[in-house]
Image: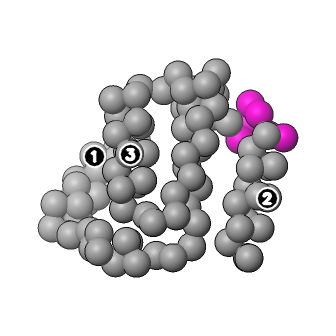
């Protein structure tokens, strides 16, 4: 625990001094899958999903309405998540 503040400062310094090449992300041609818990904070996670949808040309948003990021889809609905990932991977391979 004593080393966490230093680690967080290092992350923040890197985030502040770096730039994200959004144009390069826009050129990513493979499908992107985003699983979203419907009970997670829509202002934060919803905005994140919408930003990703604007960036990636082939973007799928899968909303798990009864899930929250503290009880995530992959843990609480593994069969549905696995099915969605298999379909996503098949599209990526196709």
Residue, disc 2: 86
Contact flag, marks 2 and 3 (Cβ < 8 Å): no
Q: Is residue 84 visible?
A: yes
Residue sitting nearer the eye, 88 or 19: 88
Question: Residue 83 at what x, y percent from top left?
Answer: 81, 49
Residue, disc 1: 5
Residue sitting nearer the eye, 84 or 72: 84
Tell me, for residue 42, which label it has, or none.
none
Residues shaded magenta: 74-79
Toward which corner of the image does residue 16 lie, by quadrant? bottom left
In the displayed structure image, the side of residue 88 where residue 44 appears, left or right: left
SS at badge 3: helix
SS at badge 2: helix
Q: Does the magenta portion include 10?
A: no
Q: How many marks?
A: 3
The kind of secondary structure the magenta stretch mainly shows is helix
| Mark closer to the observer (1, 2) | 2
Looking at the image, tell me whether mark 2 or mark 3 is earlier in sequence order.
3
Question: Residue 84 at what x, y percent from top left?
Answer: 74, 50
Q: Residue at x 79, y 40 (%)?
A: 80
Residue lying at the far right in this picture: please name it: 79
SS at badge 1: helix
């Amino acid at each position: 625990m004593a080393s966490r503040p230093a680690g967080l400062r290092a992350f923040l310094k890197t985030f502040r001094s770096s730039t994200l090449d959004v144009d390069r992300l826009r050129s990513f041609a493979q499908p992107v899958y985003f699983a979203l818990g419907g009970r997670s904070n829509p202002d934060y996670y919803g905005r994140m999903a919408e930003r990703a949808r604007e960036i990636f040309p082939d973007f799928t948003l899968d909303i798990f309405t009864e899930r929250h990021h503290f009880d995530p889809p992959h843990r609480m609905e593994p069969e549905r998540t696995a099915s969605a990932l298999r379909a996503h991977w098949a599209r990526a391979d196709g």
